Image (cartoon, rainbow, N blue to C red):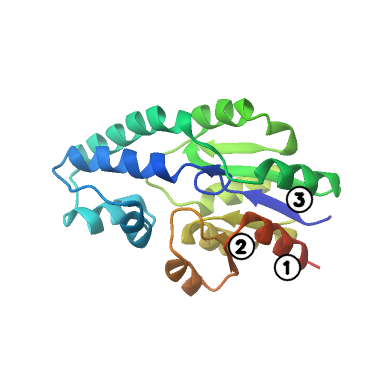
Amino acid sequence: MRTHIVWDWNGTLLDDMSAVVGASNAAFATVGGAPLSLEQYRANYEIPIPRFYHRVLGFQPSGAQWEALDAAFQERYAELAVECGLTDGVAELLAGWAAEGRTQSLLSMYQHERLVPVVERFGIQSHFLRVDGRTGPSHGQKAASLVRHLAALADRVDPARTVLIGDAADDALAALEAGAHAVLYTGGSHVRANLEPVGVPVVDTLAEAVDLARTLVR
């Protein structure tokens, strides 16, 4: 088996940080929270999301508050995300990786039934062996989803020869738990200083990430 890439979606293939921050600020407003700038968001962001909300709001939201926060985020994100495009160079990177005879798939914590139409709208779905979005609660972590994703691809993909490319520390932690490699991209939800302590390669462009994927697995 050749090297396989599992791509993250939000903040990685999709350049949607403006929508994420705008939706987060709409959510914070429901409980009296102050808005964040993009820089403040990226410096404070972490997964699981309830821990991030606790950090920026200064209190732990109740169950009812969490539901209100999540509903406000999802509604505003859906409005803002229609203006977002793919990260520069994504179409070429996906096509180039496929042209080398290598495989790739997409795993996101964005709701599955919303993810699939967006991927199709960009016309890139044919590059992926599989596209999986979130089917459970919106505040979970990625490790279990990655294990299921790779299990579904077991006839074509070896986790030990897989590289997950994402923008969050949680992506790398998921990869390590699943027995895969990871490369983290600084153009999304985290600043570099919050990615480097995870101990996997950190890059500033997706082209660098793909180049590293070629060398991480021999």
User: Residue 216, labelled with which disc?
Assistant: 1
In the rendered image, which quarter is residue 62 located in?
top left
Q: Under tag 2, what secondary structure?
A: strand
Mark 3 — residue? 157
Residue 70 is at least partly visible in this image: yes
Report the side of 164 relative to 143 (left or right): right
- Residue placed at 54% from the left, 47% from the top? 145
Say which amino acid is labelled 2: Val
Mark 2 / mark 1, whichever is N-terminal: 2
Q: Are marks 2 and 1 in contact (CB under 8 Å)?
A: yes
Mark 2–mark 3 Cα distance, whole angstroms, equals 18 Å
Say which amino acid is labelled 1: Leu
Q: Quadrant of the N terminus?
A: bottom right
In the rendered image, which quarter is residue 160 located in?
bottom right
User: Mark 2 or mark 3: which is in front?
Assistant: 2
Residue 197 x %, y %: 47, 74
Q: Are marks 3 and 1 in contact (CB under 8 Å)?
A: no
Crowd tier of the residue under label 1, counting other residues whose Cα lies within 10 Å: few below 14, some 14–19, many 20 or above:
some
Mark 3–mark 1 Cα distance, whole angstroms, equals 16 Å
Q: Under tag 1, what secondary structure?
A: helix
Residue 96 x %, y %: 79, 47
Report the side of 117 relative to 43 (left or right): right
Q: Quadrant of the C terminus?
A: bottom right
Residue 116 x %, y %: 58, 29
Q: From the viewer's perspective, is residue 89 above or below residue 165?
A: above
Say which amino acid is labelled 3: Val
Mark 3 / mark 1, whichever is N-terminal: 3
Report the side of 89 relative to 48 (left or right): right
Mark 2 — residue? 183
User: Residue 116, labelled with which disc?
Assistant: none
Residue 192 x %, y %: 47, 67
Mark 2–mark 1 Cα distance, whole angstroms, equals 9 Å
